[in-house]
Image (cartoon, rainbow, N blue to C red):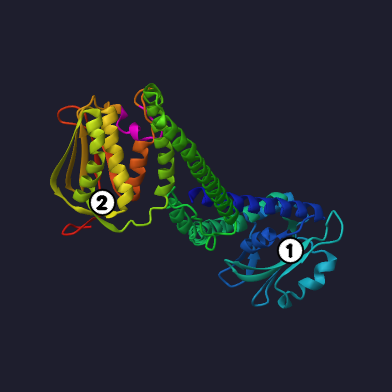
Amino acid sequence: MRRLIARLLMFHVGTLFLFAIVFIAWLVQTDDGGVLVSPEYAEVAGRAIERSPSGYLSLKETRELAELRGKNADFWFVARSDKGEIVTSGKVPDIYRGLAANLDRMSFADIRDAREPYSYLAIIRQVSAPAGNFTILTKGNLFSPTFVVMFLSNLLMIPLLVVLAVVTLIATPVIVRRAFAGLSTVSSAAGQIDIERRGARLPTDQVPAEVEPLVEAVNGALRRLDEGYDRHQRFIVDAAHELRTPIAILQAKVEASDDPDLLRRFGPDIGRLATLAEQLLDLQRIDRLARMNDVIDLADLVRRVVADLAPLAIATGGDLAVVDLGAGQVLGDGPSLERVLANLVQNAFEHGGRRVIVRVAGAVIDVEDDGPGIPALERDRVFEPFHRLRARQTGTGLGLNLVRQVMDRHGGRVAALEAPGGGTVLRLEFAHRVGNKTV
C-alpha cells in the first residue's frame, strides 16, 4: 500500500511539472514582448505621494522613486485621489492626456503598443497609499519569464501538490481496499485446496477485472492437475487389475506343482507381487471411502484381525497377543481400518521380532514388537511411499504409507515410537470417538 501511494504521488508531481514546462514553453513561444504587465510603477508612485498638514497633496522624492527614475528617464504618472485631486510627474505622452483627464471613470487597464520598443506601455491601477486611495495612470513594464515561473510554482503548483498529496493519502487506501476486497475470498478458497479436495476452483465473481485473468489461469492449472491426477489414478487401477489375474494364475501353478523347491524359490516373490497389486488397489479405495460414519468397536476390530492373522504367527513361530485396556468406539470405515491393523501386524512379524502385542486403550491402538526397532531419524520417513530402511529389504514400501493415508481420512494419526523394552510401537490415534466419550 505504501509503495502504491508513493508511486501515485510521484505521478502527480511529475504530471504537474510536465504541465508547468509545457505551459511555460507555450508562453515563451506565443509571447510577443510579454504577457503580463507589472503594477510596480503604480505602487511606487502611490507611496511617494504625501499629504501635508494643511491637506494638500505633494510628491516626495523617495528612494525607490529616485531609483525608478534612474532606470527610466522617461518615467511619468498621473494620480487622481478619491476627492478628485491630481498629482502628476514627468512628461505624460500626448496619447494618454485624454485618459488622464478621465481617471475618475477608470479603475484598471493594461496598455501595450503593437511592436517594440513598446514606448507607450502603460497601466491604470487603484492603489491604497498612506496619503489615501488613488487611481494611477503610469508608465508600465512587462513581467520577466523568471517571474512567471516563480508565480506559477509558488501560487499554483505547491497548493495543488498539497491537495493531491492529502487526497492520495486518504483516498488510495479506501479505493484499493474496495477494489481488492474479493481477494480475501479467493485467498481463503486457495488455502482450502489440497489433495483431498480435488475439483475445487477459485471464485471469480468478486475479484477485480485486472486480477481475473490470473485467477482464471490458476483455475485452469487446477483443472489440468485434476485431469492428470485422474489419468494417473485410472492407470494405477487398470494396471493393478491387469496384474492380479496373471499373478493369481502363476501362484496357482506354483502351488499345484509337485516340485517343492519351485514353491520355496518363487512363492515369496509371487506373494509380494500379489500384495503390491492389492496395495495399489487400496490406494484407490482410500479415495472412495464412503462409510466414514460407521460406529466401530475397537476391541471387536482388534480381535477379528488378530484371529485372522493367528495362522501367520504360528507359521513364523512367533507369538501374537491382545491386551484390552478399555477399548472405546470410533467413527470410520470398518474394512479399511481392518486392512490398516492387519498391515501393521504383518509388518511387525516380517520386519520386527518374534513377539507382537496389539494393545487397545480408549481410541488408541498400539502394535508393539520386540525387533531391532526403527532409528529415530527414520520414524517419519517410513510412512513415505516406497521408502525402505534397508535397500535389500523385502516388501513393497507402500504398506505404511497406506496406513497413514487411511488414518488421515479418518482425522487421526499414526506414529512410530520406541518400545519400552526395545523394538517398535506403531500407534493409531483416532479423533472421532463415540459412546460415552466425547466425539
Q: Nearer the viewer, mark 2 or mark 1?
A: 2
Indicate whether 148 appears above or below 413.
Answer: below
Amino acid residing under circle 2: Ala
Q: Residue furthest front?
A: 258
2 and 1 marks in contact (CB < 8 Å): no
> Which quarter shows the C terminus?
bottom left
List x then y, in percent, for residue 151. 64, 55
List x then y, in percent, for residue 406. 34, 46
Q: Residue 354 or 392: which is nearer the viewer?
A: 354
Q: Residue furthest left?
A: 325
User: What residue appears at the point 35 percent right and 35 percent down from the top-left corner?
Assistant: 383
List x then y, in percent, for residue 72. 75, 52
List x then y, in percent, for residue 350. 29, 29
- Range of residues picked out in magenta: 378-388
Mark 1 element type: strand
Amino acid residing under circle 1: Thr
Residue beneath disc 1:
138
Mark 2 element type: loop
Q: Quadrant of residue 204?
A: bottom right
User: What residue appears at the point 51 percent right and 59 percent down from the top-left corner?
Assistant: 203
| Image side of residue 14 versus residue 235, left or right | right
Magenta stretch: helix, strand or loop mostly: loop
Residue beneath disc 2:
431
| Image side of residue 124 versus residue 387, left or right | right
- 10 Å crowding of disc 1: few (<14), some (14-19), many (20+): many
